[in-house]
Image (cartoon, grey):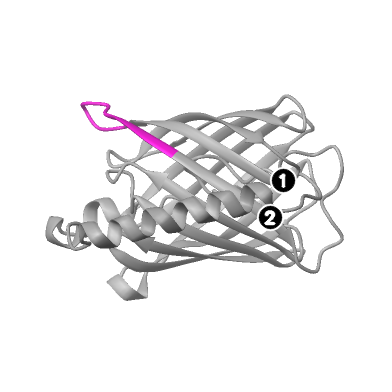
């Protein structure tokens, strides 16, 4: 998704020693896994198109029922865990779950979303992200509203992260079934503004690169990319003429 993708708590709540725990040998092994996964996803059979959320923020649209999306996320370690695998599953028309597997450091991260209003153009959802029992990080609850048309997607909401509340804003423009451009913002000096795009290489396989501009005084730039493949496990397929969820 990129809906629960950033797990940004890793930036402020992990020590440098923990980040360096992975050995070079383990890193090489994980790179091999990444290459195999990309090759597999690129060659898998396709069905209907789907585009996962935006680059940084949670989005109010839900994963379709029975759709399982598997993602490989690679990003600057100042954003979050630099290598992550993610699974996102649509359970019902109003509920989905997501789990992340981080490698540097070793971690499991959980999130969920419940649709309170799911009929477009108006959307409203709530849930939590970034819950890491392994690292004793509490879940971060959020609520978000969206206004979705065929081409324009507008998002606004709030998330409670640690001891403070933060604003969430996002916008995406879908040119067609293949191409989307997107920007988003989350308040807080440890967060960022992002700009990126999404491309559906095949109907079910897509990639989303983005540039992060940190909100801090130096406005550092960070790189990010995610590859996603969606399996229609028990769904009837993706609605036609739609790039977003």
First to last magenta residue range: 215-224
Left or right of 237 in this view: 97: left
| Residue closer to the observer: 79 or 117 | 79
Q: Main secondary structure of the magenta part?
A: loop
Residue at (80, 48) in percent of width and height:
48
Q: Position of residue 59 (x, y in %)?
A: 59, 47
Mark 2 residue crowding within 10 angstroms, few (<14) / some (14–19) / many (20+): many
Q: Residue at point 43% right, 65% down? A: 101
Task: Where is residue 92? Give x, y as percent.
Answer: 75, 68
Circle 2 residue: 230
Identify the image quadrant of residue 62: bottom right
Q: CA distance from mark 1 to mark 2?
A: 8 Å
Residue 230 appears in which quarter of the rendering? bottom right
Taking the image as shown, residue 233 lies to the left or right of residue 57, namely right
Residue named by callout 1: 50
Q: Could you tell me if residue 7 is visible in this image?
A: no
- Sequence-first disc among 1 and 2: 1
């Amino acid at each position: 998704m990129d809906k629960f993708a950033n797990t940004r708590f890793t930036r402020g709540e992990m020590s440098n020693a923990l980040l360096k725990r992975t050995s070079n040998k383990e890193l090489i092994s994980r790179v091999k896994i990444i290459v195999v996964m990309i090759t597999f996803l690129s060659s898998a059979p396709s069905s209907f198109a789907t585009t996962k959320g935006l680059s940084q923020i949670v989005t109010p649209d839900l994963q379709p029922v029975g759709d399982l999306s598997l993602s490989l996320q690679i990003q600057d370690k100042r954003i979050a865990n630099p290598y992550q695998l993610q699974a996102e599953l649509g359970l019902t028309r109003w509920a989905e779950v997501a789990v992340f597997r981080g490698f540097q450091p070793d971690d499991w991260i959980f999130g969920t979303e419940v649709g309170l209003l799911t009929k477009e153009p108006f959307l409203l959802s709530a849930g939590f992200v970034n819950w890491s029992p392994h690292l004793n990080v509490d879940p971060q609850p959020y609520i978000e509203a969206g206004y979705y048309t065929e081409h324009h997607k507008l998002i606004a909401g709030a998330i409670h992260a640690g001891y403070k509340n933060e604003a969430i804003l996002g916008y995406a423009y879908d040119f067609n079934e293949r191409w989307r451009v997107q920007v988003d913002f989350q308040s807080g000096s440890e967060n960022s503004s992002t700009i990126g795009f999404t491309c559906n290489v095949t109907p079910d396989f897509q990639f989303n690169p983005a540039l992060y501009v940190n909100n801090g005084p130096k406005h550092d730039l960070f790189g990010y990319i995610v590859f996603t493949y969606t399996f229609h496990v028990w769904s009837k397929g993706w609605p036609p003429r739609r790039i977003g969820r």
